[in-house]
Image (cartoon, helix red, strand yellow):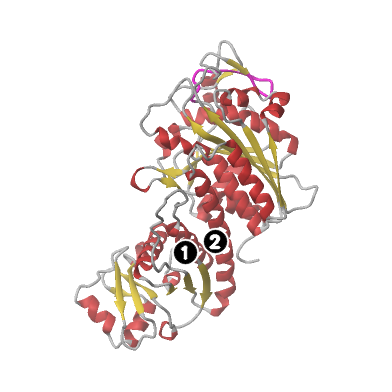
Amino acid sequence: MEFSVKSGSPEKQRSACIVVGVFEPRRLTAVAEQLDDISEGYISNLLRRGDLEGKAGQMLLLHHVPNVLSERVLLVGCGKERELDERQYKQIIAKTIKTLNETGSMEAVCFLTELHVKGRDTYWKVRQAVEATQDSLYTFLHLKTKKGEPRRPLRKMVFNVPTRRELTVGERAIDHGLAISAGAKTTRDVANMPPNICNPAYLWEQAQKLSTEYESVTAEVVDEAQMAELGMQAYLAVGRGSENESMMSIITHRGGPADQAPIVLVGKGLTFDSGGISIKPGEGMDEMKYDMGGAAGVLGTMHTVAALNLPINVIGVLAGCENMPDGKAYRPGDILTTMSGQTVEVLNTDAEGRLVLCDALTYVERFEPELVIDVATLTGACIIALGSHATGVMSQHNPLAHELINASEQSSDRAWRLPLWDEYQEQLESPFADMTNLGGRPAGSITAGCFLSRFTKKYTWAHMDIAGTAWRSGKNKGATGRPVPMLSQFLMNRAGVNHED
């Protein structure tokens, strides 16, 4: 898909399709009014006849509008002007792209980026339009024998900006949007792969692939033999029941000075989670291929970081593992010694992600990081708390938590902070070990965060629970690409990269 920006009047556009907005009730936007004047009232006459009310998401495709150079004009309902917010804007863009893709218009000039969205500038509108477009056009057809792609798909999109002064900002928005979309696509492609293909070794292959694509990136792996030497007994215990070897892939982007402390991202990479001996119900278990959503999100974010060549040092850790029931599998009642030396009583083998992550979080101490963020599809309790709309953010470091929430607002990749108060730590007490791996049903996502906090005392740390946001169930089942936009925005902010540079 090719994107560009221009600044021009609608009557001068010679394209397969020109896209303009109509507000409710039947009120033309400024650009649509210009087209109406050129066409001598052709558009307003149609609206008076009731062809389009202007409700958000309504579409009306017109052919050969009098005196208009473009072959088609797509009228897009934008709802009530004062109620147009960022969520509705993105939905309108997505619906527009899907409509264009079905019309046979291989290119289009879109004036929707001139709509007023409260609190958002041209950079945001163009970048979100790029990301919404790429998201709408995403398909996962790798394993289908009949691809079923459109005969004449949309290939070129031009976004109009109000003034020539904003062309540079628009071009930068496209560059950033494409890099973030590329990272989100990487995340979605890997997460959507079936578990008989996507195992820990496959994650390692993707890490190596990234290192061959970008000069700034190197990759290395920690295998089971190395884990055993390091004393990563919790990590190893989780994968013991699987024939697929546990592998921790480490991706390093060197964009900053050699002596700059790195930002470390750690992704939970359970390429399939059966629950182990505490086996999950059969219904919906196929979706447990998405339990590596954290690792997929870190991989995709590293792709974006490399594509933008951010001037900072970033390390991404993909904690690959598979949790299966077997004669060698770990059991409820086992007590494991973690890499940190702390002991954990296993109450449920389906609370396995935190056992993998606790050793990975201890391992990354060697990087002497500026900060560490772990990303994990960790708890169903987070879905109960926040649904599928927001990622749960937890940290005992207020400035870092605020930075992450701010990045979520900037990127429109929503997140919400949950507390990590000491009172919750009491739920992890064990009569036999330093702690249990389960804090019970109350505040389940918070106690999981409390568990991880015990392994992060030597650096600044935050935890992101993406159990509700990493994938969709139902008819539109599939990976979402989140939290790549949020993490990418956080790292862009850290690197000082914005639309004014």
Name the element at disc 2: helix
Across and down, in percent, residue 462 comes to: 60, 38
Residue 464, quarter of the rendered image:
top right
From this view, report whether residue 427 is shown above or below residue 401: above
Instruction: Name the amino acid type tagged 1.
Output: Ala
Residue pictured at 77% horizontal, 48% vertical: 260
Residue at the disc numbered 1: 129
Q: Residue at x 57, y 25 (%)?
A: 238
Q: Over which residues does the magenta segment extend?
A: 337-350
- Binning the other alpha carbons within 10 Å of mark 2 as few (below 14), some (14 to 19) or many (20 upward) gives many
Residue 367: image location, x then y, percent: 74, 38
Is disc 2 in contact with disc 1, using a CB cutoff of under 8 Å?
Answer: yes
Q: Amino acid at mark 2?
A: Gly
Front residue of 250/403: it is 250
Residue 186 spot, x, y in % from top left: 55, 51
* Residue 402 visible (yes or no): no
Quadrant housing the C terminus: bottom right
Q: Would residue 99 appear left or right of 177 to someone viewing this image? A: left
Q: Residues within 10 Å of mark 1 (few under 14, many from 20)?
A: many
The residue lying furthest to the front in this view is 145
Task: Identify whether 419 is placed above or below 4.
Answer: above
The residue beneath circle 2 is 177
Q: 355 or 160: which is nearer to us? A: 355
Q: Residue furthest left?
A: 49
